[in-house]
Amino acid sequence: MALRPGDGCLIPIPQYPLYTATLAYLSAKPIPYYLNENDHWSLAHSDLVAAVKRAKEAGTPIKALAIINPGNPTGACLPVEAMKQVVQLCYDESLLLLADEVYQANIFDKENKPFVSFKKVLREMDKEVAESVELVSFHSISKGVSGECGRRGGYFEAVNLDAGVMEQIYKMASVNLCPPITGQVSYSPFAFFPSFFASSLVSSSIHDHVACHDKSSNPLSIDNYSARVREWYTLAANRTHLYSEAVVPR
Protein backbone atom coordinates (compact mmCIF):
# COMPACT_ATOMS: atom_id res chain seq x y z
CA MET A 1 0.00 0.00 0.00
CA ALA A 2 1.28 3.45 -0.88
CA LEU A 3 -0.44 6.19 1.09
CA ARG A 4 -0.09 9.50 -0.65
CA PRO A 5 -0.40 12.84 1.14
CA GLY A 6 -4.05 13.37 1.95
CA ASP A 7 -5.05 9.70 1.72
CA GLY A 8 -6.95 8.29 4.67
CA CYS A 9 -6.66 5.18 6.82
CA LEU A 10 -9.32 4.07 9.29
CA ILE A 11 -7.86 3.50 12.77
CA PRO A 12 -9.48 2.54 16.09
CA ILE A 13 -9.64 4.86 19.08
CA PRO A 14 -8.06 4.09 21.52
CA GLN A 15 -5.16 2.76 19.51
CA TYR A 16 -1.46 2.02 19.43
CA PRO A 17 0.08 5.50 18.97
CA LEU A 18 2.43 4.34 16.21
CA TYR A 19 -0.49 4.33 13.78
CA THR A 20 -1.19 8.05 14.05
CA ALA A 21 2.55 8.76 14.12
CA THR A 22 3.12 6.79 10.91
CA LEU A 23 0.21 8.50 9.16
CA ALA A 24 1.57 11.90 10.22
CA TYR A 25 5.00 10.94 8.86
CA LEU A 26 3.38 10.06 5.51
CA SER A 27 1.24 13.22 5.51
CA ALA A 28 -1.78 10.91 5.39
CA LYS A 29 -4.98 11.35 7.37
CA PRO A 30 -6.16 9.20 10.27
CA ILE A 31 -9.88 8.43 10.06
CA PRO A 32 -10.90 7.50 13.61
CA TYR A 33 -13.61 5.05 14.54
CA TYR A 34 -14.41 4.80 18.22
CA LEU A 35 -14.65 1.65 20.34
CA ASN A 36 -17.44 1.42 22.93
CA GLU A 37 -15.95 1.50 26.43
CA ASN A 38 -19.32 0.80 28.04
CA ASP A 39 -19.62 -2.46 26.09
CA HIS A 40 -16.19 -3.92 26.83
CA TRP A 41 -14.53 -1.85 24.11
CA SER A 42 -16.63 -3.46 21.41
CA LEU A 43 -16.81 -2.31 17.80
CA ALA A 44 -20.19 -1.15 16.55
CA HIS A 45 -20.39 -1.62 12.82
CA SER A 46 -22.58 1.46 12.52
CA ASP A 47 -19.76 3.58 13.96
CA LEU A 48 -17.36 2.18 11.37
CA VAL A 49 -19.78 2.93 8.55
CA ALA A 50 -20.30 6.42 9.93
CA ALA A 51 -16.54 7.05 9.91
CA VAL A 52 -16.39 6.01 6.25
CA LYS A 53 -19.27 8.36 5.45
CA ARG A 54 -17.61 11.31 7.21
CA ALA A 55 -14.37 10.75 5.33
CA LYS A 56 -16.16 10.64 1.98
CA GLU A 57 -18.06 13.83 2.78
CA ALA A 58 -14.75 15.50 3.63
CA GLY A 59 -13.30 14.38 0.31
CA THR A 60 -10.70 12.08 1.89
CA PRO A 61 -9.76 9.05 -0.25
CA ILE A 62 -9.91 5.98 2.02
CA LYS A 63 -7.23 3.42 1.23
CA ALA A 64 -7.09 1.09 4.22
CA LEU A 65 -8.70 -0.05 7.45
CA ALA A 66 -6.45 -0.84 10.40
CA ILE A 67 -7.88 -3.01 13.14
CA ILE A 68 -6.25 -4.26 16.33
CA ASN A 69 -7.51 -7.64 17.50
CA PRO A 70 -7.01 -8.41 20.34
CA GLY A 71 -7.22 -4.74 21.13
CA ASN A 72 -4.28 -2.61 22.16
CA PRO A 73 -4.62 -1.11 24.72
CA THR A 74 -8.14 -2.45 25.41
CA GLY A 75 -7.49 -6.20 25.32
CA ALA A 76 -10.89 -6.86 23.73
CA CYS A 77 -11.37 -9.71 21.24
CA LEU A 78 -13.81 -9.17 18.38
CA PRO A 79 -16.61 -11.69 17.86
CA VAL A 80 -16.66 -13.48 14.52
CA GLU A 81 -19.82 -11.70 13.36
CA ALA A 82 -18.21 -8.29 13.87
CA MET A 83 -15.13 -9.49 11.98
CA LYS A 84 -17.27 -10.64 9.05
CA GLN A 85 -18.83 -7.17 8.89
CA VAL A 86 -15.36 -5.62 8.80
CA VAL A 87 -14.28 -7.89 5.94
CA GLN A 88 -17.49 -7.19 4.05
CA LEU A 89 -16.98 -3.44 4.45
CA CYS A 90 -13.45 -3.75 3.06
CA TYR A 91 -14.89 -5.62 0.08
CA ASP A 92 -17.65 -3.07 -0.49
CA GLU A 93 -15.29 -0.10 -0.20
CA SER A 94 -12.20 -1.70 -1.82
CA LEU A 95 -10.07 -1.20 1.30
CA LEU A 96 -6.87 -2.94 2.29
CA LEU A 97 -7.41 -4.65 5.66
CA LEU A 98 -4.49 -4.30 8.09
CA ALA A 99 -4.98 -6.76 10.96
CA ASP A 100 -2.73 -6.15 13.95
CA GLU A 101 -2.94 -9.51 15.75
CA VAL A 102 0.22 -9.40 17.83
CA TYR A 103 -1.61 -9.94 21.15
CA GLN A 104 -3.32 -13.15 20.05
CA ALA A 105 -1.58 -15.17 22.78
CA ASN A 106 -2.42 -12.62 25.49
CA ILE A 107 -6.17 -12.74 25.98
CA PHE A 108 -8.29 -12.62 29.14
CA ASP A 109 -11.19 -15.00 28.46
CA LYS A 110 -10.22 -17.73 26.01
CA GLU A 111 -13.40 -19.76 26.49
CA ASN A 112 -15.99 -17.00 26.07
CA LYS A 113 -14.06 -14.51 23.94
CA PRO A 114 -11.41 -16.44 22.01
CA PHE A 115 -9.07 -14.98 19.45
CA VAL A 116 -10.00 -15.68 15.83
CA SER A 117 -7.73 -14.54 13.02
CA PHE A 118 -8.99 -12.34 10.21
CA LYS A 119 -7.46 -14.76 7.71
CA LYS A 120 -9.69 -17.54 9.05
CA VAL A 121 -12.76 -15.31 8.83
CA LEU A 122 -11.82 -14.16 5.32
CA ARG A 123 -11.39 -17.74 4.11
CA GLU A 124 -14.89 -18.59 5.37
CA MET A 125 -16.58 -15.74 3.49
CA ASP A 126 -18.23 -16.12 0.10
CA LYS A 127 -15.77 -17.02 -2.66
CA GLU A 128 -15.88 -13.58 -4.28
CA VAL A 129 -15.08 -11.86 -0.99
CA ALA A 130 -12.54 -14.46 0.14
CA GLU A 131 -10.53 -14.11 -3.06
CA SER A 132 -10.82 -10.32 -3.40
CA VAL A 133 -10.23 -8.61 -0.05
CA GLU A 134 -6.57 -7.72 0.42
CA LEU A 135 -5.40 -8.62 3.92
CA VAL A 136 -2.13 -8.08 5.74
CA SER A 137 -1.87 -9.81 9.14
CA PHE A 138 0.82 -8.83 11.66
CA HIS A 139 2.35 -10.88 14.47
CA SER A 140 5.33 -10.39 16.78
CA ILE A 141 7.52 -12.57 18.98
CA SER A 142 7.68 -9.77 21.56
CA LYS A 143 4.13 -10.65 22.66
CA GLY A 144 3.28 -14.16 23.77
CA VAL A 145 6.56 -15.95 22.98
CA SER A 146 9.37 -14.65 25.14
CA GLY A 147 7.00 -12.38 27.05
CA GLU A 148 9.33 -9.39 26.79
CA CYS A 149 8.43 -6.36 24.68
CA GLY A 150 12.10 -5.59 24.11
CA ARG A 151 12.54 -8.72 21.98
CA ARG A 152 12.08 -7.17 18.56
CA GLY A 153 11.22 -9.64 15.83
CA GLY A 154 8.07 -10.29 13.87
CA TYR A 155 6.45 -10.92 10.53
CA PHE A 156 3.42 -10.21 8.43
CA GLU A 157 1.44 -12.34 6.01
CA ALA A 158 -0.13 -10.87 2.89
CA VAL A 159 -3.24 -12.42 1.35
CA ASN A 160 -4.72 -11.58 -2.06
CA LEU A 161 -2.14 -8.89 -2.81
CA ASP A 162 -1.13 -8.39 -6.43
CA ALA A 163 2.09 -10.14 -7.44
CA GLY A 164 3.59 -6.83 -8.54
CA VAL A 165 2.87 -5.31 -5.14
CA MET A 166 4.45 -8.28 -3.38
CA GLU A 167 7.55 -7.87 -5.51
CA GLN A 168 7.93 -4.30 -4.28
CA ILE A 169 7.32 -5.38 -0.68
CA TYR A 170 10.15 -7.93 -0.93
CA LYS A 171 12.43 -5.22 -2.34
CA MET A 172 11.63 -2.87 0.53
CA ALA A 173 12.09 -5.64 3.11
CA SER A 174 15.48 -6.58 1.67
CA VAL A 175 16.93 -3.12 2.30
CA ASN A 176 15.57 -2.72 5.84
CA LEU A 177 17.74 -3.14 8.92
CA CYS A 178 17.29 -6.50 10.62
CA PRO A 179 16.11 -6.88 14.24
CA PRO A 180 18.67 -7.52 17.01
CA ILE A 181 20.13 -11.01 17.38
CA THR A 182 17.84 -11.97 20.27
CA GLY A 183 14.84 -10.98 18.17
CA GLN A 184 16.01 -13.12 15.26
CA VAL A 185 16.64 -16.09 17.54
CA SER A 186 13.21 -15.71 19.16
CA TYR A 187 11.61 -15.70 15.72
CA SER A 188 13.01 -19.17 14.99
CA PRO A 189 9.85 -21.20 15.84
CA PHE A 190 7.94 -19.48 13.05
CA ALA A 191 10.78 -19.78 10.53
CA PHE A 192 11.82 -23.36 11.26
CA PHE A 193 8.41 -24.77 12.19
CA PRO A 194 6.02 -23.06 9.74
CA SER A 195 2.96 -25.18 10.52
CA PHE A 196 0.67 -23.89 13.27
CA PHE A 197 0.78 -27.19 15.12
CA ALA A 198 4.57 -27.43 15.21
CA SER A 199 5.19 -23.77 16.02
CA SER A 200 2.60 -23.99 18.82
CA LEU A 201 4.54 -26.87 20.38
CA VAL A 202 7.73 -24.83 20.19
CA SER A 203 6.08 -21.76 21.71
CA SER A 204 4.49 -23.76 24.53
CA SER A 205 7.88 -25.32 25.32
CA ILE A 206 9.37 -21.85 25.60
CA HIS A 207 6.56 -20.76 27.92
CA ASP A 208 7.06 -23.83 30.12
CA HIS A 209 10.79 -23.18 30.49
CA VAL A 210 10.33 -19.45 31.07
CA ALA A 211 7.82 -20.24 33.83
CA CYS A 212 10.34 -22.54 35.51
CA HIS A 213 13.12 -19.95 35.37
CA ASP A 214 10.80 -17.17 36.55
CA LYS A 215 10.36 -19.08 39.80
CA SER A 216 14.10 -19.20 40.42
CA SER A 217 16.09 -16.56 42.22
CA ASN A 218 18.34 -15.99 39.20
CA PRO A 219 16.35 -14.42 36.36
CA LEU A 220 17.73 -14.56 32.85
CA SER A 221 20.27 -11.91 31.92
CA ILE A 222 20.84 -10.32 28.54
CA ASP A 223 24.20 -12.10 28.27
CA ASN A 224 22.84 -15.65 28.46
CA TYR A 225 19.44 -15.04 26.89
CA SER A 226 20.36 -16.14 23.34
CA ALA A 227 22.06 -19.29 24.56
CA ARG A 228 19.09 -20.18 26.75
CA VAL A 229 16.63 -19.57 23.95
CA ARG A 230 18.61 -21.90 21.68
CA GLU A 231 18.39 -24.51 24.44
CA TRP A 232 14.61 -24.08 24.58
CA TYR A 233 14.29 -24.44 20.82
CA THR A 234 16.40 -27.60 20.83
CA LEU A 235 14.15 -29.12 23.47
CA ALA A 236 11.07 -27.98 21.60
CA ALA A 237 12.41 -29.38 18.34
CA ASN A 238 12.79 -32.76 20.00
CA ARG A 239 9.12 -32.61 20.93
CA THR A 240 8.10 -31.93 17.35
CA HIS A 241 10.48 -34.43 15.73
CA LEU A 242 7.94 -37.26 15.64
CA TYR A 243 5.45 -35.00 13.90
CA SER A 244 7.77 -33.16 11.52
CA GLU A 245 7.25 -35.36 8.48
CA ALA A 246 3.49 -34.89 8.71
CA VAL A 247 3.18 -31.23 9.61
CA VAL A 248 6.31 -29.36 8.51
CA PRO A 249 6.62 -28.65 4.75
CA ARG A 250 9.92 -29.75 3.24
Image (cartoon, rainbow, N blue to C red):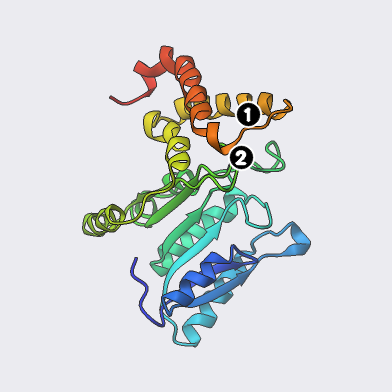
Sequence-earlier tag: 2 or 1: 2
The residue at the point 44 percent across, 83 percent down is 60
Q: Is residue 99 above or below residue 143?
A: below
User: Height in image: 219 above or below 88?
Assistant: above
Task: Tally the marks.
Answer: 2
In the rendered image, which residue does mark 1 sit on? 210
Q: Residue at x 49, y 33 (%)?
A: 226
Of the residues shown, which amino acid type is indicated by label 2? Gly
Residue at 74 percent of width and 27 percent of height = 217
Q: Amino acid at mark 1?
A: Val
* Label 2: which secondary element: loop
Q: Residue at x 46, y 50 (%)?
A: 138
The residue most toward the bottom is 58
Residue 86 in percent (x, y) is at: 52, 59
Contact (Cβ within 8 Å) of mark 2 with mark 1? yes
* Residue identified by numbered label 2: 147
Viewer-closest of 180 and 126: 180
The picture places residue 242, in percent across and down from the top left corner, at: 42, 12
Q: Nearer the viewer, residue 77 or 6?
A: 6
Q: Is residue 225 above or below residue 74?
A: above
Q: Residue furthest right?
A: 38
- x and y percentages locating residue 131 in the rendered image: 33, 51
In the rendered image, residue 137, in percent from the top left (x then y), is placed at 44, 51
